[in-house]
Image: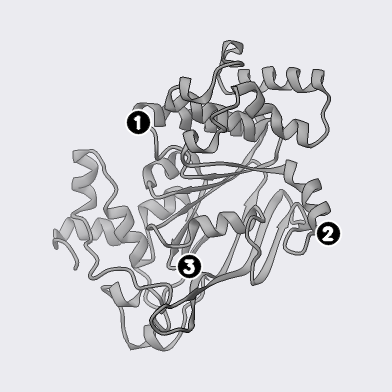
Amino acid sequence: MMTVKAARDELLRVERIRKHFGKRSRIRKVSRVVHAVDDVSFEIGRGEALGLVGESGSGKSTIARCVLRLERVDDGLIYLDGVELTRLGSRGLREIRPRMQAVFQDPASSLNPRWPIHQVIEEPLRVHGWGAAERRDRVLEVLEEVGLSHRYLNVLPHQLSGGQQQRAGIARALVLRPELIVADEPVSALDVSIQAQVLNLLVALKKELRLSYLFISHDLRVTRHLCENVAVCYLGNIVEVGAGDALFTNPLHPYTASLVSAMPLSVEDARQRGQTIVLAGDPPSPLEPPSGCRFRTRCFRAQTQCAEGTPKLEPAGAAHRAACFFPLDPDFLRDRAAGSPGSTG
């Protein structure tokens, strides 16, 4: 198992990963390539949460699957606490998997409907060789951590509410005492009131257990509540990374600004932010991504240079980076609200 010395307090490091999928066309009789993830890099510190946001099809879930080694990357490196994951064999993966676990979007479909909750939660312990008495004690402990009573030990998943099902899913992820949780839209299938409860649980667990999260969501409000840092993904590229408050207050990339402007807010906050930025057209196909900047076909600031070269993530202040040849002014949204220019489309 290959290891390198990790940076101070750095748990996960992703370096320029790329993942493409082949797709055969029935009409053309040739294989085509889906550019799912291209040249993606980020880091997550111990006890920190990184939110990965973007539209459907932007590559968020593929990045998560690559981090969990459910997909093999075509290129690039992934390190968990200095251990290189990308080239691990089955034995190495078995040793490292207890340290990284997943929480899925739909709790109902992620739990075995024929197993009672205690069996669902203790299965990872059985796989990794825990004894029967140890398993039972740990299951009771983790149920308490997620706010479920021991009364639910013999209940089937369909007998639980959506929020209780997701708590069971979180308990299963926590039972091996992982350091990293990859949460793929963990609250999007829940009612709004239940979303808040589960989200507050994730925040509390993060503090109590010093967990790190790779938190995938299309909801910027949810991401802002949980995550210290946010990475914005568009068509397989990360276009902006920054501390949550700075990124939501002063977005530098036009795509990020459009997402922030569309966030549901109170009447007063919406007045200060101005009208929603309406992007032109639809996202391009990952089968044929545009040359240069992939966002240029919908960008209200695109120029010739955007088609000729690919912008890199460049520093733009402390812990803030944007991949744009013509980044927005720091007070773009505020100035827009003051000028009341209307929507951009």
Q: Which label belongs to residue 191?
A: 1
| Quadrant (top left, top right, bottom left, bottom right) of the N terminus | bottom right
Bin the neighbour count of mark 1 within 10 Å (Cα to Cα): few under 14, some 14-19, many 20 and up.
Answer: few
Q: What residue type is disc 2 on?
A: Thr
- Distance between the alpha carbons at the discs numbered 1 and 3: 29 Å
Residue 251, position as x, y percentages in the image: 37, 59
Rendered residue at 73%/46% (across/down): 97
Q: Which residue bears the numbered disc 2?
A: 3
- Distance between the alpha carbons at the discs numbered 1 and 2: 43 Å
Q: Which label belongs to residue 221?
A: none
Q: What residue type is disc 1 on?
A: Asp
Residue 47, position as x, y percentages in the image: 64, 41
Q: Which residue bears the numbered disc 3?
A: 236
Q: Quadrant of residue 82?
A: bottom right
Residue 11 is left or right of residue 255, and the answer is right
Residue 69 is left or right of residue 53, and the answer is right
Q: What residue type is disc 3 on?
A: Gly
